[in-house]
Amino acid sequence: MKRSSIIILFLVTILFDCRQSPNNDIAMSESNGKDLNQLDVLIQNLETEGMYGSFLLMENDSVLFQKSIGFSNKERGIRNNSNTIYLYGSIVKDYTMALMFLLESEGKLNTNDKISKYFENVPEDKKNITIGQVINHTSGLVEYQDLVDENVGKKYQDLGYPNDLFPMTRKENLDAIFSAKLRFKPGTGDGYSNAGYTLLAILAEEVTGRSFEDLIHQYILKPAKTKTADFYASPLWKKDNVAVGYSKFTYGEENSPVYWPRNPGAIKGNGGLAGSLMDIYLGTRHMLSLEQTNPTFRKLAKKYKYTPGIPMNYHGSAGGGMLGFVAFNFVIKDKDQYLIYASNNNTEGEDENMLRKVMKLGFGFDIASIAPGEFADETKGEEEVNTTNKGERNKWGLPNKLKYDRVGAFIDLLSNKIDLETFKTNDCTDKFSGKVSKLFKTWQKSEHLQYHQVTSYGTEMELILKDTLTQKEYIFDLKLEKDINVKFKSIKFKK
């Protein structure tokens, strides 16, 4: 699946809704010196800031800590829990890689083979690409094949599909992958390629005569004894157990894998799978166990590694996309410790420091120890906070972060606590500032407005205010620029 930039292993967004939960599905073992109480406080605070998601820490095949926060389906009042089904995203690449290793151990392919051995009409510039180069992202292949052919893209967009759900055919995938210009000469660079993993999935189908879905079930999910892990539109799932993704990109009756195309071609081999956090654990544990039981698998895992740049004692993978989900998986092998995390209201950005804190409190392990220089000093690098009128802002109960200071300023405007010119100058982009005066005439102004709720989807937010006299609610759609100043670029009153 498509990913935003990942610093080492992490692909995470903290999103905000300002609501506490009395039922958080908490499970904790004895701490063994770990600060699990502080970990519980940390994650509860994330819920007050609006995060939806689940955390699972496993140690020696036992649950060390487990907690879920926020909603799997806000509209129907269903909360996330330990059984909630989330997208795996690019964690599926681990499965595709493992499948390649297992097929080599059975003599069905060799990772040193050139892809031209398995596909006809491979262009001259790509004939010498090896399977191994595709596995470790040194092939030079295009990053996303669904963006290559405008006609294919338009066809599926006109049918209402977001890119991550394009049901591209085998021919459309291969035509796009082979026709796209190489980013660099194979073997001379490093370039992340979703398209490459789609090619690997198609190759696995080619050498076995079976579907990619069947192969993943046979080689990984079944021996791992997962219960819910499956491809989209799974008959295994009950709708209420599957999280809805909160994003500006949506598809289906609800934006849920229940309604999405099964294993859509655009993300075959690099996405399309969903399941519970426990099933992510079971699948990962099984694949890592193959390093001990299968000599060929062990040799190839060491050669290609799971995560380039990370020592063999650690395994990490992360995934996300345009449909509101993110997942993260980190393993300390010699201690048999696993951190699994997933969210269903993640749309953009990342907060690797949040997961760094989770690992430090849960395992006493600092990820910065294996990734020096990739993390800010813990006393610095926090999101910029506008300290002007800090007390004035905090009285609305909003998080003390810049984008929420903007929301506080907007509430101040509607409550007649600041004037329009001040709001336009301090809190609006230059382009939007000229439109605010006209729009302000349509907005309800009252000294009796009370902040009720704000839901954040990155830089897009929904604000609900309530008039304490009439009990009437007022809903606004807010959009902030993607910039360090995060000023308003759009505000709409939803009548």
Image (cartoon, helix red, strand yellow):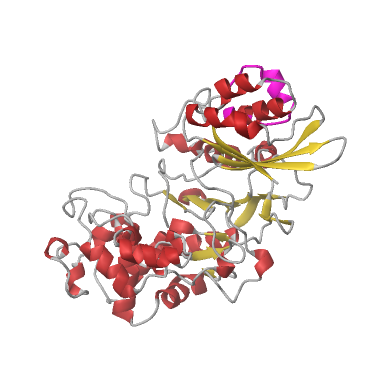
How many labels were placed on the picture? 0
Residue 400 visible here: no
Quarter of the rendering containing residue 475: top right
Task: Indicate the quadrant where residue 440 lies.
Answer: top right
Q: Which residues are magenta?
A: 386-404
Residue farthest bottom in this picture = 209
Point out the image quarter for the N terminus.
bottom left
Q: Is residue 450 visible?
A: yes
Q: Position of residue 138 (x, y in %)?
A: 24, 53
The residue lying at 70 percent from left, 29 percent from top is: 411
From what the image shows, is residue 5 above or below residue 377? below
Q: Is residue 14 left or right of residue 96?
A: right
Closer to the camera in the image, 260 or 161? 161
x then y, percent, for residue 482:
47, 35
Image quadrant of residue 211? Answer: bottom left
Query: Residue 148 versus residue 131: which sits nearer the camera?
Result: 148
Percent x, y of residue 337? 53, 50
- Where in the figure is residue 300, as x and y percent of width and height? 30, 61
